[in-house]
Image (cartoon, grey):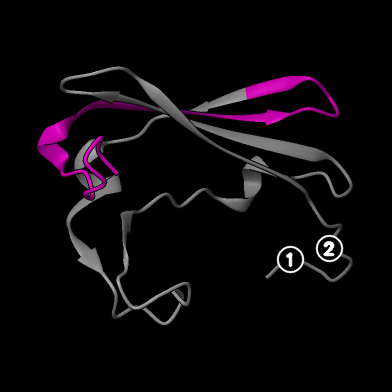
Amino acid sequence: MDASGNPVTQSEVSDLTCSVWDTTANTETGITLDVSTCISDNLIAADPRWTADTIGYNLILEIDGSYFPSGGHIYRVELNVLPSAGNPYSLVWEFIAQTIYSSSI
């Protein structure tokens, strides 16, 4: 969302950087992102994965499971947004990865 509460568009974002921290092991892995891949200029509501509301989303951040290899570890994803105008800001998620006991697909 921008300062007015509207969804940001690609032209409003100069750069995105993302880091995945394994806070248990104290390691960081950077992820290369492309603004045009991660920000949609239109809200996406017709996606069965989106159940929060009927308005939709416009941030698409798909991170491969290989960034979270250790069950029981605490991982932190930090998405840093550099807007075309205004101050940079970050979106942060933190969770505990679950151990997968079955064989890989």
Q: Tag 1, which secondary structure?
A: loop
Residue range corresponding to the magenta coloring: 1-28
Q: Dots 1 and 2: beta carbons under 8 Å?
A: yes
Q: Which residue does the image show at 22% across and 64% down from the upper left?
A: 43
Q: Which residue does the image show at 30% across and 17% down from the upper left?
A: 87
Identify the residue under disc 1: 104
Q: Position of residue 95 (x, y in %)?
A: 74, 47
Q: Position of residue 10 (x, y in %)?
A: 15, 40
- Asked if residue 2 is among those painted magenta in the image, a careful observer would answer yes
**72, above or below 46, in the image:** above
Mark 2 is surrounded, within 10 Å at the Cα level, by few (under 14), some (14 to 19) or many (20 or more) other residues, namely few
Of the residues shown, which amino acid type is indicated by label 1?
A: Ser
Of the residues shown, which amino acid type is indicated by label 2?
A: Ile
Image quadrant where residue 23 sits: top right
Q: Quadrant of the N terminus?
A: top left
Q: Tag 2, which secondary structure?
A: loop
Identify the residue under disc 2: 100
